[in-house]
Image: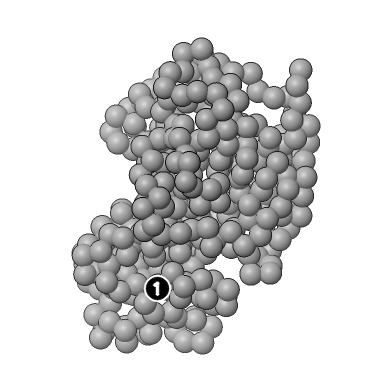
Amino acid sequence: MPKMKAAIFAEPGRIVLESRPVPDVGPLDALVRISTTTICGTDVHIQRGEYPVQRGLIVGHEPVGIIEKLGSQVAGYKEGQRVIAGAITPSGHSYACLCGQHSQDGGTARHGFKPAGGWRFGNTIDGCQAEFVLVPDAMANLAPVPSNLTDEQVLMCPDIMSTGFAGAENGGVRIGDIVAVFALGPIGLCAAIGARLMGATTVIGVDTVPERLAVARRLGIDHIVDYRKIDPVAAIREFTGGRGVDVAIEALGQQQTFENALRALRPGGTLSSLGVYSGDLRIPLDAFTAGLGDNKIVTSLCPGGKERMRRLMAVVAAGRTDLGALVTHRFKLDQIEEAYELFGHQRDGVLKVAITP
């Protein structure tokens, strides 16, 4: 049986490289040879044991690659074709999918529905930090990559770009809005770009890491707030003439940033939460105005499926944004443990790493 190298969750604190069998291909599957992938903040939560997955699972959910083999019932694709698949891999026929909630596609009426069930790679099935990945429901999930785009230009589409844009979309950003983004990691930066694309005329970014602030300026964020130098809520109130922002996007997953995002809102504004939280959240009575402020709190799991991927790649191909700048470090798959050490500790100004088998 052919073997491949793969990064697996061994135990809390350890993701290691092992040899695994190359997956067999079912009728509706596609085997994709990985050409480039990356590490997500959620993978770090998995590594630390903060998000539970089965030991021995291959991690990773952001694949760019080439179709190696197609299932017998897969039509419309060809072997050798360059593709991406979203971190969310909906079946296309579940109740959740037919309600338009592809990311929640999981479980059955008989066995119970699982929240966030559309996220399968590196969560409930083997992921893509490996030489090959098996893509389920290939006809719903494989999106051909335009020939004029590089791997690194589309590397953010499967998760980071889709998630960040969803934060702006679900936040209901409108033309002329003022938007604050709390935490300018890759997802926060994509949320800021998404807000601008949706019509926000002022975007305020909050962070403290110099490299992130520099990238935010290059990407055209209007105001930068270093929260170590100034209270971000006070600064946002000053920028907005005391009004507050229409939409605040929380992109870190911590109590303090959640509270600050809530306090930065205008009456009737929306808090759009993208963070992955590791503990219970508390909503302060005053920031919530005792429930009388007409505010909304919405959450998002990145939309997936081939049409979402096509649209995101179209944004890149049209020159509306270039997310290649988010890739700051590059590693071979053999260096995956070194890559996790760097990314997990956020050293050397890292934003995203590109992993090539």
Please identify the quarter of the rendering in which residue 22 is found.
Answer: top right
> Vertical placement of 3 versus 238: above or below?
above
Q: Which residue is drawn at 76% across and 26% down?
A: 3
Taking depth in this image into account, of 194 and 57 the one nearest to the observer is: 194
- Give coordinates of residue 125: x percent, y percent: 58, 31
Quadrant of image for the C terminus: top right
Quadrant of image for the N terminus: top right
What's under tag 1, amino acid-wise? Ile
For this view, does 244 lie left or right of residue 90? left
- Give coordinates of residue 119: x percent, y percent: 49, 38
- Give coordinates of residue 321: x percent, y percent: 41, 59
> Vertical placement of 159 versus 323: above or below?
above
Residue at the extreme front of the image, as rendered:
148
Q: Which residue is drawn at 34% across and 67% down?
A: 248
Q: Residue at x 61, y 45 (%)?
A: 37
- Give coordinates of residue 171: x percent, y percent: 30, 58
Evaluate whether residue 324 shows in this view.
yes
Evaluate whether residue 104 shows in this view.
no
Task: Identify residue for label 1.
Answer: 221
